[in-house]
Amino acid sequence: MSAGLLRIIPPAMVVRRPHRMIERHIVAYRRQWLIVVSGFFEPLFYLLSMRAGLGDLVGTVSVGGREVPYDAFVAPALMASSAMNGAIFDSTGNVLHRLKYSRIYDAALATPMSPADVATGEIGWALIRGQLYAISFLVVMAALGLTNSWWSLMALPACALIGLTFAALGFLGTTFMRGWSDMDMVTTLTMPLFLFSATFFPISAYGSWAWVVQLSPLYHGVALVRAANEGVWTASMLGHVAVLTAVALVALTLAARRLDALLRK
Amino acid sequence: MTAPLLDAHRLVKRFGDFTAVNGIDVQVQPGEAFGFLGPNGAGKSSTMRMIACVSAPSEGSLHMFGLDAATHGAAIRARIGVVPQLDTLDTELSVQENLWLYGRFFDLSRAESKRRTKELLEFAQLSERADSIVDNLSGGMKRRLSIARSLINEPELLLLDEPTTGLDPQARHVLWDRLYRLKQQGVTLVLTTHYMDEAEQLCDRLVVMDQGRIVAEGSPRSLIEQYATREVLELRFAAGTNDQQTAALAGIGERQEVLPDRVLVYANDGEAALVQAHDRGARPESALVRRASLEDVFLLLTGRSLVD
Amino acid sequence: MATLAPRSLIGPLRVAEWHLLIYRRFWRMNVLSSFLQPMLYLLGLGVGVGSLVDANTSSSDTLGGVSYVAYVAPGLLVTTAMALCAAESMWPVMGGLKWQRGYHGIATTPLTATDIVLGHGLWMAVRGATAAAAVSVALALFPETRSWGLVPTVVVAALVGMAFAMPIMAFSINAEMDGGFAALQRFFIIPLFLFGGAFYPITQLPVVVQWLAKIPPLWHGVVVARGFTTGNIDWLATAGHLAYVCLWIAVGIVVSVRRLRRKLYP
């Protein structure tokens, strides 16, 4: 690469070897496969509990003018939430450990790897893992008769976008953490998103407070997955995609900068 | 004379208002073993991080292998090996996975990386622990693994930041032996240490750093000759009488130093100095004549007060 | 059994005091999350989903004639204590033995393994009760959930907390790696939270699941707590449920003491 171009793109931002980080994770997780598999069950338990227990109590919910059973209403939202939770999980605790305690990022940066390679690799890994969960969850939904058409497959790219957004946010947040006690913050921040992103009840229930819900990136993710599952596409979907993409891009750029500042001071 | 492998000119590193490295000039030739000595906070580790191309100099120029470190960091890092002060081993991986996956960061093919892993396990005497999880290794084993890992890219230059701190004597000697072998193979070594015996064992040439500056430079022997006498006489007096006894010693040897527990007399002939002291009426409880060491030079140049 | 009895209550109190001293460094963040989380669930599920449930007229009978938020509130009090005490009996217990090794420190004093176990139980009762009490105060602010029944409910929550803390402590004492804790959370605590009767009557569930849900102490605690807050108390059944909860505490204590003694004085 010419020196001229190098001056335009700072070396820290060059992305060439993110797959090396992913390869490391695949080897490491071969020993911890049970932990990986167990991540699939949490949304499944929620779905089964809602379906069996609350299905009768709630009855039907109106989505885009159509009355759908409660489990069909909740399932896409749980899928979107688990994409968020999985991405956050992978990009916070695990990253903090590697950043501050085992310090394997320091080791990686002593090689031709760049900080952007590390950040992109971590986020890529979170995405791969998230897609595995999303695919399994979609299969379960289909088996339970909660999918409507082939449009439901569009829930997968939607989950990838949610995963990307939250992995980038999680990674960015982790670069500010001082230690393990700050991890409590993660639950404190994600739980309200999980509960109040039109996940368990429609946004109409908020009345004039609906705009607050729209501030949640997860709300836009839930709306996308729900629309995919219902096969109802409107122009507002573009808006949801735009919000998630914008948040993801900003967070990614800031995260790579922060990592660079932390590791290459 | 060949082109230097490392060429630093007026190198400065600042963190906010604090200047960690304050304009140092260093050249290291291929095949040399070069040491940075200095108390904690002298700027050794900051210098090492700049040389490892993981920290950008605030001022000055740094060239390695003839490449500018500011623009060719990745290309330079591909040709060096780094043993950090604190192990950065991957605790979630086994010993051999630590090695071959690290090789992948250097774009080695999987087959090549695994071949070198086998050799390095042998070199580091870790073949039997190849499948152990890193967490279960002893401190000495972890250090050897760190060194083995730093060699996976067959580096031309090896950077070692306090390689033997915290190890027991046996483990230190094994490490010194491995480093000596690397040096014989033509690998250039740059290391920091605050063990003087380590510097004397390993380094052809060294610099003493204090408060971000280089205060002395030369081979271990030449530094001792320049800054110390050939021998040192250590005298211990009864508690509390150091000062009055010292008065009697005036003029003996080239220089004297009064410490809380003993008096040091720097002289080329220690025995003769001891006889002189006796003649002047000094009555020490014990006396010891020893060769001057790098430690004497170090303490002279960087002072005796604790640096925290 | 004589060897299991503590010399006096002083020992366990000393151990509980030790826990309190350590906790003083972390309490701010901790209080926030252990109070905030149940409140968020109450708002999100109790009020939010409640609006859907209460709109569905046929649901009132299933819930025994109370609003959904009033139905869920006591369940959340008890599950809060469960989740808190379960987690506090995993990593911290392993830390006491393996990482910070505080238990080994105590073991060099005249205090015994029994003191450590009972001290932990006492501390868990305090933590469970304070968390439940904080939520109760918040619940008392709203007419729909205000009731004198909240007072005994705090005691029930503390008992359920101990009924999870003590057996899990026994598990943690013998655990080799902390990987088992994540599995315990995901395959035991979270399913219980979801299927343990906090959010709907377990009669909604298939019969096999109902039986499974009745084995751990949670459902028994939830039923008793709900009896107190809604005022439909069957005293005989209440006594039976509470005895069952206490049985879990007792078994957990006995096993924990045995195992801890073997670990500390091999």
Image (tube, grey):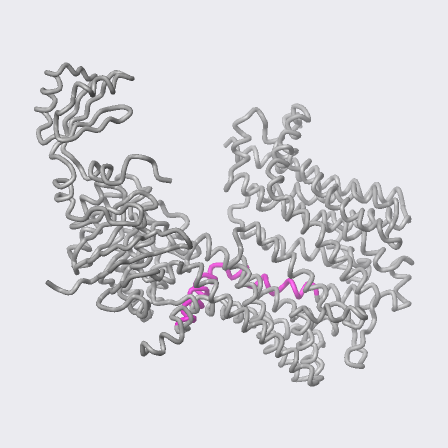
Q: Position of residue A169 (x, y in %)?
A: 56, 66
Read off the magenta span: A17-46
Please name whichever residue, A156 or B222, is drawn nearer the observer in this view of the structure: B222
- Count of number-bearing discs: 0
The quadrant holding residue A86 is bottom right
Please name whichever residue, B223 or C131, is drawn nearer the observer in this view of the structure: B223
Q: Is B288 placed left or right of A66 in the picture?
A: left
* Residue B269 visible: yes
Residue at 75% in and 65% down: A50
Q: Is A131 placed left or right of C86 in the picture?
A: left
The quadrant holding residue B199 is top left
Q: Is residue C65 above or below residue A119?
A: above
Q: Dominant secondary structure of the magenta stretch?
A: helix
Q: Position of residue C165 (x, y in %)?
A: 66, 43
The quadrant holding residue B24 is bottom left
Q: Is residue C55 above or below residue A64?
A: above
For the C terminus of chain A, which image quadrant?
A: bottom left
Please name whichever residue, A69 or B216, is drawn nearer the observer in this view of the structure: B216
Q: Is residue B255 above or below residue B158?
A: above
Residue at 71% in and 81% down: A230
Q: Position of residue B98 (x, y in %)?
A: 37, 59
Q: Position of residue C213 (x, y in %)?
A: 74, 54
The verdict on residue C7 being magenta is no
* Residue B104 visible: no
Residue at 35% in and 58% down: B96
